[in-house]
Image: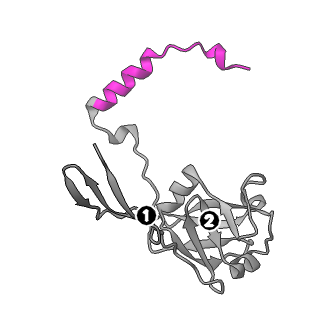
Amino acid sequence: MKIIIDFDTVTQKVISVTTDEGTFPVNVETENKKKRVKKEKIEDDSLTVLVGDNKLILTSKLVEKLEVKEGDRLAIMYKESDGFIEPFLGKADLFTGAGGNKLTKSLSISFRGDQRESLLKFGNKFEIEAVGDGSVKLISSVKVKKPEQTLITDLPKEIQDILMAEDEKLDLDESLFNL
């Protein structure tokens, strides 16, 4: 079998393929083009926080307001107010004493996994409101209510009986708990 490939050296594309059975034009694009994802940008002069892919992006104006620099550790803490949970951003030593994530030169902090998922419940773009203790409150259009606790007495009688029976099955030696 004889195969002839007509190739354009300028565009580096195959134009047609000829075999014993005939000539077949090639209309397939041979270049692979990567799709570019348009990233949301924030203005550097705004007081905004953006949740990006595995990072939290801050503006230089916000960094000045928080009085932090590259290498300082920042953390998010959630506080309850009027039945709602609100996120706050500040130096890690304000909230936890240790931990937090380091601020990078590009004004972002690593923000992955559960941390990221928890904050995304409130949205992905936040305006800020200053708080007197050196932290800022992150404000978005999404409000998250504090989860309500269910008491055993609020459950139906059948479920209460099952739960009480399970408690009675646990015959623990109290001496195990004495230190």
Task: Kindly report which numbered mark, 1 or 2, lies closer to the viewer in this rendering.
Answer: 1
Q: Is residue 12 above or below residue 141?
A: above
Q: Is residue 1 above or below residue 146?
A: above
Q: Is residue 79 above or below residue 1?
A: below
Q: Residue furthest bottom?
A: 45
Q: x and y percent of residue 155 in the render? A: 32, 39
- The residue under the point 79% across, 71% down is 68
Residue 28 or 54: which is nearer the viewer?
Answer: 28
- The residue under the point 62% across, 65% down is 56
Residue 145 or 149: which is nearer the viewer?
Answer: 145
Q: Is residue 7 above or below residue 129?
A: above
Q: Earlier in the sequence, mark 1 or mark 2?
A: 1
- The residue under the point 80% across, 71% down is 69
The residue indicated by pointer 1 is 31
The residue indicated by pointer 2 is 56
Q: Determine which of the numbered discs, if any, sits on residue 17 in the image.
A: none
Q: x and y percent of residue 54 in the render? A: 58, 58
